[in-house]
Image (tube, rainbow, N blue to C red):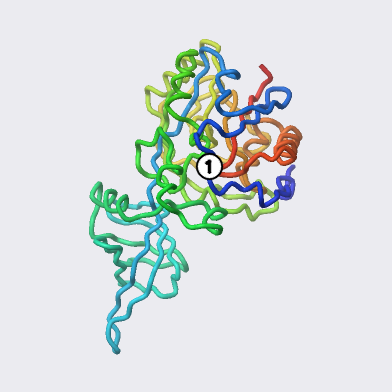
């Protein structure tokens, strides 16, 4: 039985990446397939073979950080306060659950104006507020796209503000389905040139959708990890994606999700070992040591935060002791960590 402290490690602050490497495939890549090999993402075709299938998450990140002003009539005239909002979950065509700073300056019925877009506070729970906007659907999406900033992870946002460069850096080349408030960062390493080389090699790919939520950054607080309540996220495995995955498995190819979000989704949609079915809905699957993998033969992923559910996931995939060795090697060799950091390619069974 593992406790939370089992997934802790000391990370030098200098190894936290605040910007990604350019070009995208220039990032370093640790490959674990029995032993440990130091490579780069551009070397990926060396470690894959014809018939393998990469599974990408095609969610598109919303520029979900909005800066506005709260307007309220008071006995002494109009009261104005600067408010920063981070959208975290869409609950209808015109309504979002959000985190607001400073939330103490908001009350029910307040209106916040973000340039030409405005929103009314309809619910409040501490720092969490529910906002109903004066636009909805695609019109609201377009308005947010025009005025919002990328919702960088807390460990980056605490060091610097999001800027125009992040609008490109924090979005994958697969991003087509709007709905995430955090990027599926393992896919940030791919560009069209690398994809073309993989295609020529005979490596196949398919896409699924998991709208990554702000819950991905929530800390685990339970010492007994079995007691942790996993956050829920919406996802879809299409009939086409399920068919490609099943065909690959039947032909003896390896199914390698790119990112923990893609892995969690295809394991959610698994029917049994070696078979997946089309699926749509909310998943709160919590993959930790002891989990029996049904679909994924490996994983391409970045290096994760200490004491996180993602550390628990890679430990389930590779084995606890192996992951400790991988992370020790990464730290000793100066790999860059977290969302904008370097990559790893992890094979569940030595092949």
Residue extending farthest front: 22
In the image: residue 113, left or right of residue 57? left
In the image: residue 295, left or right of residue 349? left
Q: Is residue 263 above or below residue 306?
A: above
Q: Residues within 10 Å of mark 1 (few under 14, many from 20)?
A: some
Total numbered labels placed on residues in the image: 1
In the image: residue 97, left or right of residue 259? left
Q: Position of residue 306 (x, y in %)?
A: 67, 48
- Hey, which quadrant is residue 77 in on the image? bottom left
Q: Is residue 106 above or below residue 118?
A: below
Q: Quadrant of the C terminus?
A: top right
Q: Position of residue 40 (x, y in %)?
A: 60, 28
Q: Position of residue 350 (x, y in %)?
A: 69, 19
- In this view, the residue in front, 214 or 29, is 29
- In this view, the residue in front, 182 or 279, is 182
- Hey, which quadrant is residue 335 in on the image? top right
Q: Is residue 32 above or below residue 78?
A: above
Residue marked by disc 1: 20
**Which residue is found at the position 64% from the left and 35% from the top?**
314
In the image: residue 340, left or right of residue 162? right
**Which residue is found at the position 23% from the left and 60% from the top?**
134
**Which residue is found at the position 24% from the left and 61% from the top?**
116
Q: Position of residue 234 (x, y in %)?
A: 42, 42
Residue extending farthest bottom: 76
Q: Quadrant of the N terminus?
A: top right
Residue extending farthest top: 251
Query: Tag 1's secondary structure?
Result: loop
**Which residue is found at the position 42% from the left and 58% from the top?**
86
- In this view, the residue in front, 149 or 273, is 149
Q: Is residue 231 above or below residue 254?
A: below
């Amino acid at each position: 039985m593992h406790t939370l402290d089992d997934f802790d490690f000391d990370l030098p602050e200098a190894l936290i990446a605040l910007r990604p490497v350019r070009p995208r495939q220039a990032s370093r890549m640790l490959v674990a397939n029995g032993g440990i090999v130091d490579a780069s993402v551009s070397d990926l075709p060396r470690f894959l073979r014809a018939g393998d299938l990469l599974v990408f998450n095609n969610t598109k990140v919303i520029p979900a950080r909005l800066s506005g002003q709260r307007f309220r009539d008071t006995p002494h005239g109009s009261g104005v306060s600067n408010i920063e909002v981070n959208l975290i979950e869409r609950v209808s065509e015109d309504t979002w659950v959000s985190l607001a700073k400073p939330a103490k300056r908001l009350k029910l019925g307040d209106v916040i104006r973000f340039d030409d877009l405005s929103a009314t506070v309809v619910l409040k729970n501490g720092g969490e507020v529910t906002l109903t906007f004066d636009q909805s659907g695609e019109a609201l999406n377009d308005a947010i796209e025009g005025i919002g900033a990328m919702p960088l992870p807390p460990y980056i946002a605490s060091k610097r503000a999001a800027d125009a460069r992040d609008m490109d850096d924090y979005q994958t080349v697969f991003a087509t389905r709007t709905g995430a408030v955090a990027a599926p960062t393992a896919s940030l390493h791919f560009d069209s040139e690398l994809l073309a080389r993989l295609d020529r090699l005979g490596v196949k790919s398919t896409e699924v959708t998991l709208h990554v939520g702000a819950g991905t950054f929530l800390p685990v607080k339970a010492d007994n990890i079995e007691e942790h309540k996993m956050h829920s996220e919406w996802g879809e495995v299409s009939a086409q994606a399920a068919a490609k995955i099943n065909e690959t498995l039947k032909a003896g190819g390896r199914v390698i999700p790119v990112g923990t979000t893609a892995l969690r989704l295809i394991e959610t949609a698994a029917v049994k070992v070696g078979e997946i079915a089309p699926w749509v809905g909310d998943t709160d699957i919590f993959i930790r040591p002891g989990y029996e993998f049904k679909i994924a033969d490996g994983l391409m992923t970045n290096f994760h935060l200490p004491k996180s559910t993602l550390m628990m996931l890679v430990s389930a995939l590779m084995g606890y002791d192996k992951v400790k060795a991988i992370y020790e090697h990464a730290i000793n060799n100066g790999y860059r960590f977290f969302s904008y950091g370097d990559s790893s390619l992890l094979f569940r069974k030595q092949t």
